[in-house]
Amino acid sequence: MCRSDQTNRDITFVAMPQGYVARFTSALINHHAGCLQRVMGCSEAMAKEITLRQLSSLYNNQNLQADSYLIAVQRLEQIIGGAWYSAQMGQAGILHWIMIEDIYQGNGHGKRLMQYVIQHCQSVGAIGLALHVFAENEQSVLLYRKLGFAMIGKEMYLQW
């Protein structure tokens, strides 16, 4: 048996433990702000402010809804990443954020997590799954394309 087969058997998906939410959120803020800083050419402070506003708005809209999920990837009793998404019958699900800890990337855990999210969205009757990804995040774009996602638009930004 190859190493990745053994690793995949050690993976489970659980409700995200409260103690991991802060780390998950911090990673989201740092990653998103870093991408904004690179693509927009803005300061770190501005990128974090934009990210925090977007996250706050999204969190406030999703926090009270029963169709919002925080799922963690657990490997040998250790949380190694997670996903935040929404899904309900008759509507497209929305992947708000997905993350695998840096040291666990490249082992198929992100793919397994995405497959779990897709299957869960299908099981609640969602009609598809939408997500946002920065074009510069080539590794994620490649993963999403391999899973069957299609590019449906482009975001544009005007800087002055």
Image: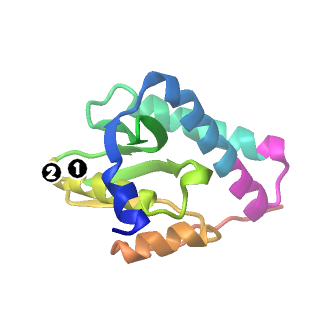
Q: Position of residue 52 (x, y in %)?
A: 64, 36
Residue 24: quadrant of the picture: top right
Residue identifier under label 2: 123
Secondary structure beneath label 1: helix
Q: Is residue 63 above or below residue 114?
A: above
Asked if the residue at tag 2 contacts the one at tag 1, i.e. Cβ–Cβ closer than 8 Å, the answer is: yes
Q: CA distance from mark 1 to mark 2?
A: 5 Å
Q: Is residue 73 above or below residue 126?
A: above
Q: Amino acid at mark 2?
A: Ser
Residue 88: quadrant of the picture: top left
Secondary structure beneath label 2: helix
Residue 5: quadrant of the picture: bottom left
Label 2 environment density (alpha carbons within 10 Å; few <14, some 14–19, many ≥20): few
Q: Position of residue 110 (x, y in %)?
A: 44, 58
Q: How is the image coloured?
A: rainbow
Q: Nearer the viewer, residue 94 or 118?
A: 118
Question: If the image is split into quadrants, where does the N terminus sit?
Answer: bottom left
Question: If the image is split into quadrants, where does the C terminus sit?
Answer: bottom right
Q: Identify which residue is drawn at 73% across, 41% down.
A: 48
Q: Identify which residue is drawn at 43% across, 69% down.
A: 144
Residues shaded magenta: 33-46
Residue 132 - label: none
Left or right: 93 as drawn, with respect to 35? left
Residue 125 in sight:
no
Q: Amino acid at mark 1?
A: His
